[in-house]
Image (cartoon, helix red, strand yellow):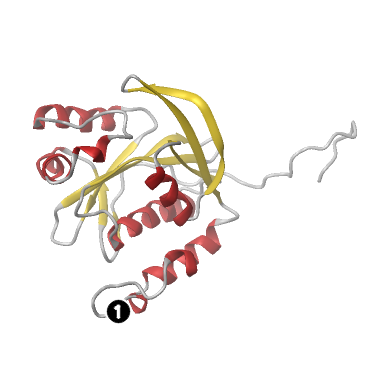
Amino acid sequence: MPVNEFGQPVGEPVDWSPGVALGPVTLTGRACSLEPLGERHVDDLYLALCRESPPSTWTYLSVGPFGDRDSFAAYLADLANRSATVPLAIVLPGGRPAGVATWLRIDPGQGTAEVGNITYGAALQRTVAATEAMYLMARHAFDVAGVRRYEWKCDDLNEPSRRAAIRLGFGYEGTFRQAVVYKGRNRDTAWYAVTDAQWPALRRRFETWLDPGNFDQDGRQVRRLEDC
């Protein structure tokens, strides 16, 4: 560990400079694509997330469930207007959107960003596309934008989200108690992250899992992502 002129331990020197800013972008994979969220997605997303998915989809989000298209459309518009936030629609083959995810808390000067506001419709949950969407966003954040740290945060009681973070390679860093009040209740926030030093190995793991050879003729995985 480096030591300064006063004999105090200090952090390792950083040879890093920001890459391309995270912004609206189209990302294309085999099982899905992501594209900048816009008005053209509202009707399909309202069906996918509000009519064809259970209300429990919204339990751990700060908003929803939505009973009408207009309030849902207003929420999507609000996402697009938030500072340091880039919302993307997750589109399945055939062109129908089935989910939303955002980059948020983007800090180019420090090389950090978070993936959040992840809302998967029933048709997207537990699919190859669901995993590939997270891979495509992480790959762009690290390989194009050059982030040093990529975060995932969720309600400490949201067990599915916590399991997803670990499965996707995010390391648990602790829980911030009484961090947020939403929907009139307390939220302790669990923090997870991946660093740029960890990303190359994690990228290989994603690519190994996503390879068509890892799926049988019925589309079932041969090896789990955790085992790749």
Residues packed near mark 1 inside 10 Å, few (<14), some (14 to 19) or many (20 plus): few
Q: Residue 75, percent across and down? A: 21, 29
**Residue 158, above or below 95:** above
Query: How far from the left and from the top, in percent, is residue 182?
Result: 35, 23
Q: Is residue 71 left or right of residue 120?
A: left
The one nearer the camera, 96 or 214, is 214
Residue sitting at x 27%, y 52%: 34
Q: Nearer the viewer, residue 188 or 80?
A: 188
* Quadrant of the image occupied by residue 81: top left
Left/right of residue 181 with respect to residue 13 in the rendered view: left
Locate residue 32 relative to residue 7 in the image: left or right.
left
Which residue is label 1 attached to?
216
Q: Quadrant of residue 117?
A: top left
> In the figure, is residue 159 to the left or right of 99?
right
In percent of width and height, residue 28 lies at 29, 59
Residue lying at 29% horizontally and 79% vertically, measured from the top left: 216
The amino acid sitting under disc 1 is Asp
Total labels: the figure holds 1
**SS of the residue under disc 1:** loop
| Point 61% across, 46% down: residue | 16
8 vs 24: above or below: above
Question: At which x and y percent is residue 31?
Answer: 26, 64
Q: Nearer the viewer, residue 73 or 112?
A: 73
Q: Residue furthest top?
A: 184
At 25% from the left and 41% from the top, the residue drawn is: 57
User: Quick check: 91 above or below 183?
Assistant: below
